[in-house]
Amino acid sequence: MRARLRVCVLISGSGSNLQALIDARDEGRIDIDIVGVISNQADARGLERASRAGIPASIVEHQDFAHRNKFDRALGLLIGAGKPHWVILAGFMRIVGSAVLDPFKGRLINLHPSLLPLYRGTDTYQRVLDAGDREHGASIHFVTGELDGGPVISQVRLPVLAGDDKHKLAARLAPMEHRLLVSTIEFFTQHRVEYSGAEVLVDENSLEHPLLLQADDRLV
């Protein structure tokens, strides 16, 4: 019998994606043990969500460190303390360095609000609107040293509507991001996904295109 999947979740803000994982866990949809929540912001509302769920939570504020690598070392130690199988960056608004990347290589995933490889970085909603795109979405990818450049595992898509602004677009995407994250972690609990160098393996086969979330929450 395989061990229950141990995950550590990194946040910076409201923690709505964390809450989606907690709810899915409590409903029995995903067999995970959230061993820790770490925020780089002391006022992140997601810390309250962790506390209510009885999940150990830690704060490591980046502004307390004179050098970026010192922050990364402290963050890496906090992550490692929970001995997670996977580390989930869910609205974590910091770029992680080698002190985190190296010990957890192939075990870090990030939820990013764009259809990667389009629109890496921040302000993706406005950039989509400025470009006149008809479609937006979110991606989950393995974290590497290249900003939002790791192999993409899964995506969800939604149309850009007439009258959308960045706030409306973000509000419509948010619940779809939650579904994408839960469905992707469900795949991980089934031990169907692996990181192999520059590619993603699903059921031991190279993934040619990201898995796409369907209306019934299946990834195909």
Image (tube, grey):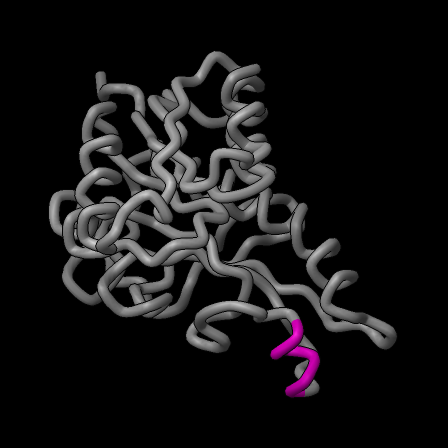
Quarter holding residue 75: top left
Q: Is residue 204 above or below residue 64?
A: below
Q: Position of residue 64 (x, y in %)?
A: 33, 43
Q: Name the side, left or right, on which 147 lies relative to 67.
A: right
Q: Is residue 20 visible?
A: no
Q: Position of residue 67 (x, y in %)?
A: 22, 54
Which residue ends up furthest to the bottom in the rendered image? 131
Which residue ends up furthest to the right in the rendered image? 163
Q: Is residue 178 visible?
A: yes
The one nearer the camera, 2 or 119, is 119
Q: Name the side, left or right, on which 136 lies relative to 209.
A: right
Q: Is residue 117 above or below residue 34?
A: below
Q: Residue at x 33, y 30 (%)?
A: 7
The one nearer the camera, 38 or 102, is 38
Would residue 182 be counted in the magenta stretch?
A: no
Quarter holding residue 171: bottom right
Q: How many marks?
A: 0
Q: Magenta-highlighted stretch: main secondary structure?
A: helix
Q: Position of residue 53 (x, y in %)?
A: 53, 15
Q: Is residue 133 above or below residue 10?
A: below
Q: Position of residue 110 (x, y in %)?
A: 39, 52
Q: Residue at x 67, y 56 (%)?
A: 173
Would residue 127 be counted in the magenta stretch?
A: yes
Quarter holding residue 13: top right
Q: Name the side, left or right, on which 169 lies relative to 214.
A: right
The one nearer the camera, 174 or 25, is 174
Q: Residue at x 24, y 55 (%)?
A: 68
Provide the residue span drawn in magenta: 126-131
Give the position of the N terminus as an image quadrant: top left
Q: Residue at x 55, y 35 (%)?
A: 43
Q: Name the side, left or right, on which 87 lies relative to 9.
A: left
